[in-house]
Image (cartoon, rainbow, N blue to C red):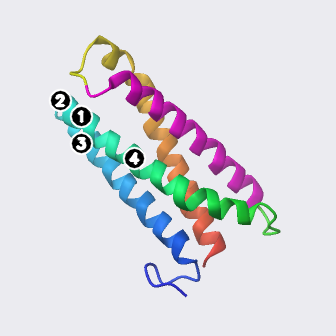
Amino acid sequence: MSNLFRTTAPLASEISMFIQLLAFCVLIIGFIVVKRNLFKIHGAVMFSAALLNIISVLFYMIPSALDLVDTSIPGFNILFRTHILLGICVIGLSGYILLDWRFQEPGSTCFQNKKWMLGLALTWTAQIILGILLFMRLYQ
């Protein structure tokens, strides 16, 4: 039994959940920063959130997911597959936006991506909520 969240989850799953919650907090900070028109800081904050997400996925989620492929928990598989699909979308879209930005001053392309960024934020939030639900379903 691990101690971060007082669940029956393996320590790796709890670390992953902690990193994802931290990434979500950073995502909220990024939203606040952009509303104050601090666009370069917003980019750096969002880069940090994306980096946290990628670390969590590569080092914790993928190894855990490989162990969970054959589970018989009712309703789990659809939740699990939706979480994976949203996660792939989040990593792909955040990677595209960050590569387009490349730590430059905000320009016309940055503001053209505004709708994509909002969609990414909503998808990312949904993906994190599904991850929390999966975690709760697996490790009550």
Q: Nearer the viewer, mark 4 or mark 2?
A: 4
Q: Quadrant of residue 68?
A: bottom right
Could you give the CA–CA distance between mark 3 and mark 2, rounded to whole angstroms?
9 Å
Q: Is residue 54 left or right of residue 72?
A: left
Structural distance between the alpha carbons of marks 4 and 3: 19 Å
What residue sits 46% from the left and 79% below the top?
Answer: 5
Q: Principal SS element in the magenta part?
A: helix
Sequence-earlier tag: 1 or 4: 1
* Residue carrying label 3: 32
Badge 2 vs badge 1, beta-carbon distance below 8 Å: yes
Q: Residue beneath label 4, please? A: 51
Q: x, y percentage for residue 78?
A: 75, 53
Callout 3: few (<14), some (14-19), or many (20+) C-alpha neighbours within 10 Å?
Answer: few
Q: Earlier in the sequence, mark 4 or mark 2?
A: 2
Residue indicated by mark 1? 34
> Could you tell whether 27 is left or right of 38 in the image?
right
Q: Is residue 90 magenta?
A: yes
Question: Mark 4 touching mark 2, by CB under 8 A?
Answer: no
Q: Residue at x 64, y 64 (%)?
A: 64
The tag earlier along the polypeptide, 4 or 3, is 3
For the record, the magenta segment spans 76-103
Q: CA distance from mark 4 to mark 2?
A: 22 Å
Q: Is residue 40 above or below residue 5?
A: above
Where residue 132 sits: x, y (%)? 54, 62
Mark 3 and 1 residues: CB-CB less than 8 Å, in contact?
yes
Task: Classify mark 2: residues with Cα within 10 Å, few (<14), some (14-19) or many (20+).
Answer: few
Mark 2 to mark 1 CA distance (whole Å): 5 Å
Q: Which residue is mark 2?
A: 37
